Amino acid sequence: NAGVTQTPKFQVLKTGQSMTLQCAQDMNHEYMSWYRQDPGMGLRLIHYSVGAGITDQGEVPNGYNVSRSTTEDFPLRLLSAAPSQTSVYFCASSRGTVTDTQYFGPGTRLTVL
Amino acid sequence: GEDVEQSLFLSVREGDSSVINCTYTDSSSTYLYWYKQEPGAGLQLLTYIFSNMDMKQDQRLTVLLNKKDKHLSLRIADTQTGDSAIYFCAESGGGTSYGKLTFGQGTILTVHP
């Protein structure tokens, strides 16, 4: 298993540009989520999904959209990038049972100029 | 909302024990986790504890939970230079919120030879 994969690893955008961060898992996990990591603030939940076709907002959803058309993929879209979205983004997945654990991808480092 | 607090830095000598502390505010927290993040990498689950437990031991790792004080600690015995990393405490509730983790800011552990 490749586990949780994220692309790209690094990205630089200009203010106002749009892009999609990709996340995929091959473990047939129902639960997937996106976090952002900022210095001194830990990780904060952006959006999550409990299965294909179902998404919901986390703690910091503004400026981000998600969709879950398949179990494997959970892309994160930035429609109009802002410097405040400069961060490291992590995708995570789990089977979705109460005793299960989340597996994290390697992260995408995004800089918005 | 939920809040998780950690001290930001800890420095120890190789071979000593490290104790990383965490406090949380959500009394309905059901699961508490410790994650490790090495430079440039994603998060790796180290261990977790259910809220109805006081202690959990896993090789060099000991987790203590004081539910009354909402205090969680991670003790690493015989700390090695390879243990240098950022350690995150995280909590989640039960039921439908089990996968929505709230993270602390992270503790940077530095191990000196």
Image: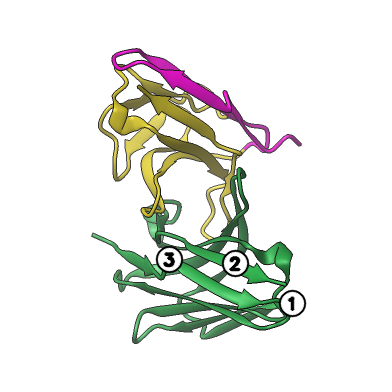
Chain colours: A yellow, B green
The mark that comes first in sequence, 2 or 3, is 3
Which residue is label 1 attached to?
B59
Quadrant location, the N terminus of chain B:
bottom left
Q: Are marks 1 and 3 on the same chain?
A: yes
Q: Residue furthest top?
A: A17
Residue A94 location in percent, x, y?
Answer: 57, 46
What's the chain of the residue with tag 2? B
Viewer-nearest residue: A45 or B42: B42
With B48 as the anchor, is A35 left or right in this view?
left
Amino acid found under the numbered disc labelled 2: Thr
Q: Is residue A32 magenta?
A: no
- Is label 1 or label 3 in front? 3
Residue A83 location in percent, x, y?
Answer: 30, 28
Residue at 35 percent of width and 68 percent of height: B5
Quadrant location, the C terminus of chain B:
bottom right
Residue A14 location in percent, x, y?
Answer: 35, 15
Q: Secondary structure at mark 1?
A: loop
Amino acid found under the numbered disc labelled 3: Leu
What's the chain of the residue with tag 1? B
Which residue is label 2 attached to?
B110
Amino acid found under the numbered disc labelled 1: Gln
